[in-house]
Image: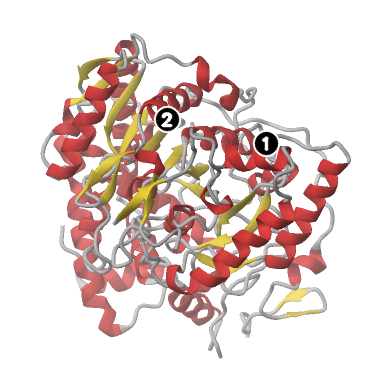
Amino acid sequence: MSLSPDEVRRIAHLARLSVADDEVAANANDLSNILDLVDRMNAVDTSGVTPMAHPQNATQRLRPDVVTEPDQRERYQRLAPAVERGLYLVPRVVE
Amino acid sequence: MISGRTGPTNDGSNPVMHDRTIAELARALADGEVSSVELTRGFLDRIEARNPDSNSFITITREQALAEAEVADAGRAAGRAGALTGVPIAHKDIFCTDGVRTSCGSRMLDNFEAPYDATVVRNMREAGLVMLGKTNMDEFAMGSSNETSYYGPVNNPWDPRRVPGGSSGGSAAAVAARLAPGATGTDTGGSIRQPAAMCGLTGLKPTYGRVSRFGMVAFASSLDQGGPLARTAEDCALMLGAMAGFDPNDSTSIDRPVDDYAGALDGVSLQGLKVGLPKEYFGEGMSEGVRGVVDGVAERLRELGAEPVEISLAHTDLSVPAYYVVAPAEASSNLSRFDGVRYGYRCEEAKNILDLYERSRGEGFGAEVKRRIMVGTYALSAGYFDAYYLKAQKIRQLISEDFRKAFEQVDVILGPTSPTTAFPIGERSDDPVAMYMSDVYTIAVNLAGLPALSMPAGFADGLPVGVQLIGNHFDEGRLLGVAHQYQQATDHHRQVPAGVND
């Protein structure tokens, strides 16, 4: 498995990661090596094997549909890089 | 370098406080030999003096620690003290701590003061444990050497030019350097056991679902599990008792009573204990020094009454490949929350929303984290799901079945924790795949959700070697008991790195 520089740029875009031009080649090399490692999975035939969903086959617990969280908007928004009147600020999205 | 043997004494002399185990400190507090404030101040002074060299702490919480210690002392004076009240410990900086920076070793969260406590942090505070500070770690727990931390590498107390292991490297180095008697860690692919082995400690990764993940910054949610790092199995038992338990806030927490791990230690017998030796763990890849030590443990256990049994875990060599699909896939999803909008790092002067996302993440994450996000993104992208993620989950099933069959034959499984002792800082940092192979013996346990511990087993070229004991689901008590019995008959866990007691 060998990833091209364009594939690295496409994956980085899907992951919303900026990758500098001079980092693309090194990333292509590292990611290709990791995918080579991963491809060793193909040594075993897994047809008919049920994929594991949970180590103890536990199922997701349900809880009553009631309000459990108190309002902590102000506390949480103090952590934000930019807020105004209770809203998170981002660059203009709609022209 | 080993400077000698100290720790628990049988001759009536008392070691200095910082060299005592959690169990010994708990007794000293109960006997009134020392107060929690005195003890806490002593550890804080050591940390502040030695952390510039060690770098095992990211944040030292002096004022809060002393305030907690005062509460512990007041509680004890009023007759309200549990087994661990007033004992100071450290938390890996992956556990959210209300009002205290929780960086996860990343620039992304360098400015993040968590708005709530992780359940583990809350449980341990309610048990009366005092938090000294937050320990260094690989960024978002992605690493096996602590070298991916935004805050720099950590020195291994046994040889400061070497790594302490990772990702819980700061926790392991802090305990080995006697800057804390115990510390929390998390283990997604070996991140408690491997640093425990490389720093000469005992460390336990519990059964998936035993310890709450609420407030533990998520890396790979189907694999992550918190656990203790300390010097002895007894201390790990005491810590696990305080950490574990059902938590409605973690949807994968298992609703099952917590065993009395510490109380059960003496009841575990090595007589007739069937110890599985997986032939796949004793093949190539293990260094000769490690092999000699692991063989020695098997022989010692036999002398103590156990019955070694050769077993096979046939799909062992597929565990690292499957892990590097599952873990990055889950990481790419979990880490999508870091967007530069609600908390964490935000880039300067974003041109538009896409630029804001891409540069906040590109600048806020380090190289290894970005690599894993990209691997996971690729594995989950359209057209590749069956070939990667589904295939990996099927291999997980095969690995799990190997263990299921093994535990029909044996009580515990013994093998190396890490193929080598601690390696020099920088040796593997440019070769991700070589670094990943550091976890070749630990990863299968996470894929199968099993408990496992690493305990000190001897030395190779002056560096500690750990062995791993793997148990069946919820068999933490037996693992701790076996390790405790071994530690009653040996003194590998009592060795002290040179310089630590200067």
Q: Position of residue B133 (x, y in %)?
A: 61, 61
Residue appearing at x 22%, y 38% in the figure:
B318
Q: Position of residue B451 (x, y in %)?
A: 44, 31
Residue appearing at x 66%, y 54% in the figure:
B39
Q: Quadrant of the C terminus of chain A?
A: bottom right
| Residue A45 visible to the viewer | no
Instruction: Give SS at disc 1.
Output: loop
Q: Nearer the viewer, residue B372 or B139?
A: B139
Residue appearing at x 42%, y 61% in the figure:
B138
B411 displayed left or right of B387? right
Amino acid at dot 2: Leu
User: Which of the 4 quarters of the picture holds residue B403?
Assistant: top left
Q: Nearer the viewer, residue B243 or B235?
A: B235
Q: Nearer the viewer, residue B409 or B377?
A: B409
Instruction: Give SS at disc 2.
Output: loop
B185 displayed left or right of B59? left
The disc numbered 1 marks a residue on which chain?
B
Which numbered disc covers residue B247?
A: 1
Above or below, A81 relative to B22: below
The disc numbered 2 marks a residue on which chain?
B
Which numbered disc covers residue B450?
A: 2
Residue appearing at x 70%, y 36% in the figure:
B248
Q: Neighbour class for label 1 at 10 Å: few (<14), some, many (≥20)? A: some
Above or below, B187 relative to B482: below
